[in-house]
Image (cartoon, grey):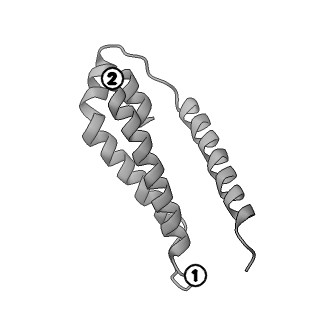
Amino acid sequence: MIAQNYKVFNEPGKVKMTWVYCLIATAVIFAGAFLVPETVKIPKIIIPLIYSWATYYLVQQLQGAQIDTHVKAGGEIYSWWRAIGISLIGVVITFAIIFVILLFLPNS
């Protein structure tokens, strides 16, 4: 959604960088989640809460004023259903990548 906002704001260079940062962040989040020892008891909701809050904060800092201006000017706003649909597509792609990686890892 952040990259789409940059498209609407006509900032194509930031669109590409947003995708790069997104891929790096996703890799770091997954690596971090897999590297936490099983003996450490962290509630499963903590990691999603942290990255969701961080994303919200970044959007407010980087795009908040532009979003407000866009909405006040009568700009197009998409529904939550679109965001949920795109998120589900992202989940399917992420799990497909994980499946392929696990498929080619040697059995230990």
Q: Amino acid at mark 1?
A: Glu
Would you name the residue on which mark 2 appears? 9
Read off the residue under disc 1: 38
Mark 2: which amino acid? Phe
Work out whether 67 lies above or below 34.
Answer: above
Q: Secondary structure at mark 1?
A: loop
Return the x and y of residue 68 as percentages of the image width and height.
28, 26
Indicate the quadrant where residue 2 lies: top left
Could you tell whether 2 is left or right of 99 in the image? left
| Image x and y of residue 4, in percent | 44, 29
Q: Secondary structure at mark 2?
A: loop
Q: Quarter-wise, where is residue 89 in the image?
A: top right
> Which circle's residue, 2 or 1, is located before the other in the chain?
2
* Figure quadrant of the N terminus: top left
Task: Name the residue rendered at 63%, 42% in the picture.
Answer: 88
Foreground of the two, 11 or 55: 11
Residue 11 percent coordinates (x, y): 32, 26
Q: Residues within 10 Å of mark 1 (few under 14, many from 20)?
A: few
If the image is split into quadrants, where does the C terminus sit?
A: bottom right
Mark 2 surroundings within 10 Å by alpha-carbon count, few (fewer than 14), some (14 through 19), many (20 or more): some
What residue do we see at 24% from left, 30% from top?
Answer: 65
